[in-house]
Image: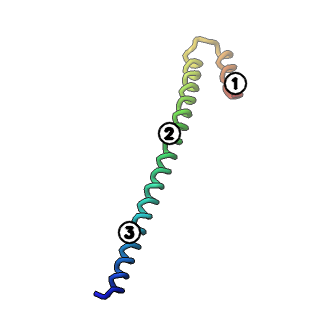
Amino acid sequence: MSFWTAMVVIVAIAAFVKMRSDRLRYAADKREVFHADERALSGEAERELADLRKRLEVLERIVTDERGPHRLSSEIDALRDR
């Protein structure tokens, strides 16, 4: 094998290693962004779930309380105005 052939092989191997390293780094960065988005969505989902639980408690209280139909109607209207 001549000197120049060896140089071409070494450069080709170095280019392949660099390309592979960049591809793996890009994939790792992409996974990190995905996990950050997932954590943000998880926090948003927790807040929405807490809000829905509060609304459900209000609706359960309205339905189970022993009040007249007029009072029930006014509370439903009040919830619509929110």
Q: Of 15 and 45, which appears nearest the observer?
A: 15
Q: Position of residue 25 (x, y in %)?
A: 44, 59
Q: Which mark is residue 17?
A: 3
Amino acid at dot 2: Ser
Whole-number angstrom distance, CA of label 3 to CA of label 1? 67 Å
Q: Which residue is disc 1 drawn over?
A: 77
Which is closer to the viewer, label 2 or label 3?
3
- Report which quarter residue 78 is drawn in: top right
Locate the C terminus and report the quarter of the image it occupies.
top right
Classify residue 20 as left or right of residue 77: left
Amino acid at dot 1: Asp
Categorize mark 2 by other alpha carbons within 10 Å: few (<14), some (14-19), many (20+): few
Q: Position of residue 17 (x, y in %)?
A: 38, 69
Categorize mark 1 by other alpha carbons within 10 Å: few (<14), some (14-19), many (20+): few
Categorize mark 3 by other alpha carbons within 10 Å: few (<14), some (14-19), many (20+): few
Q: Of 54 and 37, which appears nearest the observer?
A: 37
Q: Are marks 2 and 1 in contact (CB under 8 Å)?
A: no
Task: Point out the tag, 2 or 3, that comes first from the N-terminus.
Answer: 3
Mark 3, secondary structure of its residue: helix
Task: Point out the tag, 2 or 1, that comes first from the N-terminus.
Answer: 2
Q: Residue at x 59, y 19 (%)?
A: 62
Mark 2, secondary structure of its residue: helix
Q: Which mark is residue 64?
A: none
Q: Which residue is disc 2 drawn over?
A: 42
Q: Residue at x 33, y 82 (%)?
A: 6
Locate the N terminus and report the quarter of the image it occupies.
bottom left
Whole-number angstrom distance, CA of label 2 to CA of label 3? 37 Å
Q: Position of residue 51 (x, y in %)?
A: 57, 29
Q: Of 22 and 35, which appears nearest the observer?
A: 22
